Amino acid sequence: MTTTTTTTTDGTGREVYANYPALWHLEAIGVLDAFRGGARKEAGKTPTRVAVIDTSVAVRHPCLKDAIDTSLAIDFFSNRLGAFPYYKDGESFAPNVPNLATDVADALPATRTLLNELVDRLSHTSEPHVNGVAPCVSQEFSNHGTAIAGLVGARPAIAEIPADYIGAGASEAKMPLPYTGVDPFCRMVPISTNFDTDPEALILAFLYAEMIDAQVILLPRSIPDPFRTVPPIDHEEGVLEALMPAYPTTREQMLWGELAQLIVAISMKRPIVCAAGNFQESGGIYPANLACDHNGVIAVGAANAKGVVAGYSETVGATVMAPSNDVETYDRVSVRLDMQAADYHDRAAPQRNNNGNFSHFEVISTDVPGRHGYSYSPFESTEPEDGLREFGSYFCRFGGTSAASAITAGFVSLGYSLGEIQPGTDGLGAKNWLLSKTVMVETATGTFQCPAWAGQVSFPGLDV
């Protein structure tokens, strides 16, 4: 499988943008070679459980349908104590939640109260949708989560194309989809939340990830804590009060503080992988900036296909840097422009001043099929529930530190799946394993550690 960006030509009609492998990011960190060499999950081994706190996921995507644990997927957007979206409304169920007795909130009084409420909901056969409110997991909401899930744990698939979509008299056809995430042996649990400044929903999401005993937790986004924004708001000048529609109550302030403590406490038990931010935030966005040598929080920055720091990323505060896309920069610090672009002109930006570090490679991932994804379908009607209608909308270009964090979470998950990380390893132990599987990359734009399965990296875009 290969992909390409929009093609332009120079004066001779030569193609400017070259094709590149859709799985270049796996090649870069050595995972694809491991699969070619026969790396497989041990027979009978329980799949690694990855909790993804993000938007919902298009669970019927052919490359994801066997990778998503729909029995545990939960939505905290629609229901305060969670809705289980893949059970019918009114259907009784009893989710298999193995860690109801967790002590992670014992020192956090407000969080402990929420934990008790959640335990009470989960420990009894109950309604999947509280008060009949439908979960907010439709495909319109699932772009980001679907792309994230694909990078972590998509599987190659063969999709059927129903005869109705081929033409009159045609027989059913099959379409191979040779796409894989970093750990195609894992099982992911989508934990969908909203993006409001609501500490309670996020506390419940992290508690749920702890209660289902996830080996890896992924948060490919920031948390809108008004007291921990990046850059920090000067509270003494009253800026916070001016920006917020209502100043946080005393209870909300307590919950925001306890959420930060909860994330660190959970990270001591299981690694929490976080995106470090897309605006060169020194130290990383929150909660990636909680990462330190003494906890299991893993802050992930981005490197482009040339093996240099992406134009939007930052090495300061990042635990590791993983492959992702790039952006152009043109400021007092650096000039990184796309010299292949149709609007590039060397009189405005002389080539001798361009550091040549820009890469047009993007990360390719799974997308919401049909009209609602990043790479939407041109057809007006919806996709069939089973089977493939057309290829294009099933995959998309993706990037940012979100993509880099998903790749890193998949890498850690693969460590569990292939027995490199032993069962029962705590969050700090898993983080130390990750660091032991990195190599130091030195470039003009910074030195960073990059995951490398076999002890070396192979970035493919150096000559493109």
Image (spheres, helix red, strand yellow):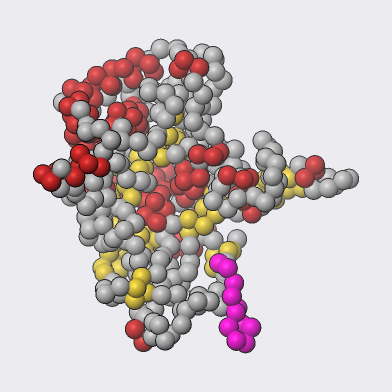
Magenta residue check for 12: yes
Overall secondary structure of the magenta section: loop
Q: Nearer the viewer, residue 231 or 212?
A: 231
Looking at the picture, does residue 398 appear above or below residue 238? below
Looking at the picture, does residue 395 appear above or below residue 269? below
Of all residues shown, which one is farthest toward the right?
Answer: 169
Looking at the picture, does residue 358 appear above or below residue 257? below
Residue 345, percent from left and from top: 46, 82
Residue in view at x 36 percent, y 65 percent: 310
Q: Nearer the viewer, residue 245 or 112?
A: 245
Residue 22: which quarter of the image? Answer: bottom right
Residue in view at x 60 percent, y 86 percent: 11
**Left or right of 38 on screen, residue 401:** left
Count of numbered labels shown in the rendering: 0
Residue 324: which quarter of the image? Answer: bottom left
Residue in view at x 32 percent, y 54 percent: 277
Residue 31: which quarter of the image? Answer: bottom left
Residue 47, percent from left and from top: 45, 37
Residue in view at x 42 percent, y 30 percent: 77
Q: Is residue 426 visible?
A: no
Looking at the picture, does residue 286 appear above or below residue 59? below
Q: Quadrant of the N terminus?
A: bottom right
Magenta residue check for 374: no
Of all residues shown, which one is farthest toward the front?
Answer: 242
Q: Is residue 250 visible?
A: yes
Please report the bounds of the magenta region as a residue range.
5-15
**Left or right of 36 on screen, residue 292:** left
Residue 294, percent from left and from top: 17, 46
